[in-house]
C-alpha cells in the first residue's frame, strides 16, 4: 500500500499549484495582444522552431478538436501570422508554419514576458529572495524529470 503524503507535501502541492496558476496568468497577460486570443498565442508559440505541422498534430498537442484548430489557424492566417503550404512528403496534406511576422510576434511576446517577470523579481524581491526562487526552481525542476 502506498504511503499517504505528509501534511507538508499536501500543503506544498496546493501552494505550488495555486501560485503557478496565478503566475502563469500574470506572465501571459504581460504580453497580451489585443488582436489574438490566448489559444491563438499558444498555437503561435507551439509553431515556433517548427518547419511545419499539420492541423491534426496541432489539435492533438493543444487538446482541441480538429475543427477548432482549423478555425484558429484560419484566424491566424488572416492576420498574416501563419501560412499553409503543401507537405513535401505528402501533397495531400497541408503544413502550418509561422510567417516572418508570426515569428516576430512570438519573439516579442517572449521578450515582453521575460522583461515583466525580471522586473517584478527586481522590484519586489531582495537578492536573497531571488536566490531562494532559483533554488526552489531547481527543486521543482526535479519533479518534471522521469
Image: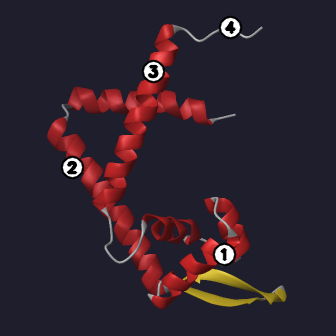
Q: Is residue 134 above or below residue 90?
A: above
Label 1: state its secondary structure: helix
Front residue of 95/119: it is 95
What is the CA distance from the residue labelled 1 to the residue labelled 4? Answer: 44 Å
Instruction: Tell me if mark 2 has few (under 14), some (14-19) or many (20+) residues whose alpha carbon lies within 10 angstroms of its own.
Output: few
Label 4: state its secondary structure: loop
Would residue 16 appear left or right of 50 to someone viewing this image? Answer: left
Circle nearer the N terminus (4, 3):
4
Q: Look at mark 2 in the image and give the residue it sits on.
A: 119
Residue 8, horizontal then vertical, whole percent: 47, 11
Q: Residue at x 61, y 72 (%)?
A: 68
**Dots 2 and 1: beta carbons under 8 Å?**
no
Q: Nearer the viewer, mark 1 or mark 4?
A: 1
Instruction: Tell me if mark 3 has few (under 14), some (14-19) or many (20+) residues whose alpha carbon lies within 10 angstroms of its own.
Output: few
Q: Look at mark 3 in the image and give the residue it sits on.
A: 12
Would residue 138 appear left or right of 34 to someone viewing this image? Answer: right
Circle nearer the N terminus (2, 1):
1
Q: Look at mark 1 in the image and give the residue it sits on.
A: 67
Looking at the rendering, which quadrant does residue 124 occupy? top left
What is the CA distance from the residue labelled 4 to the residue labelled 3? Answer: 17 Å
Circle nearer the N terminus (1, 4):
4
Amino acid at each position: 500500500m502506498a504511503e499517504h503524503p505528509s501534511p507538508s507535501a499536501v500543503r506544498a502541492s496546493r501552494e505550488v499549484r495555486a501560485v503557478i496558476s496565478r503566475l502563469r496568468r500574470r506572465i501571459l497577460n504581460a504580453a497580451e495582444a489585443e488582436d489574438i486570443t490566448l489559444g491563438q498565442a499558444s498555437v503561435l508559440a507551439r509553431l515556433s522552431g517548427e518547419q511545419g505541422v499539420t492541423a491534426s498534430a496541432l489539435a492533438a498537442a493543444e487538446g482541441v478538436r480538429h475543427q477548432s484548430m482549423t478555425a484558429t489557424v484560419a484566424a491566424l492566417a488572416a492576420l498574416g501570422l501563419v501560412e499553409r503550404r503543401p507537405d513535401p512528403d505528402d501533397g495531400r496534406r497541408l503544413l502550418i508554419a509561422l510567417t516572418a511576422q508570426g515569428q516576430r510576434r512570438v519573439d516579442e511576446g517572449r521578450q515582453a514576458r521575460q522583461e515583466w517577470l525580471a522586473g517584478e523579481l527586481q522590484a519586489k524581491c531582495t537578492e536573497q529572495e531571488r536566490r531562494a526562487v532559483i533554488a526552489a526552481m531547481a527543486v521543482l525542476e526535479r519533479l518534471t524529470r522521469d
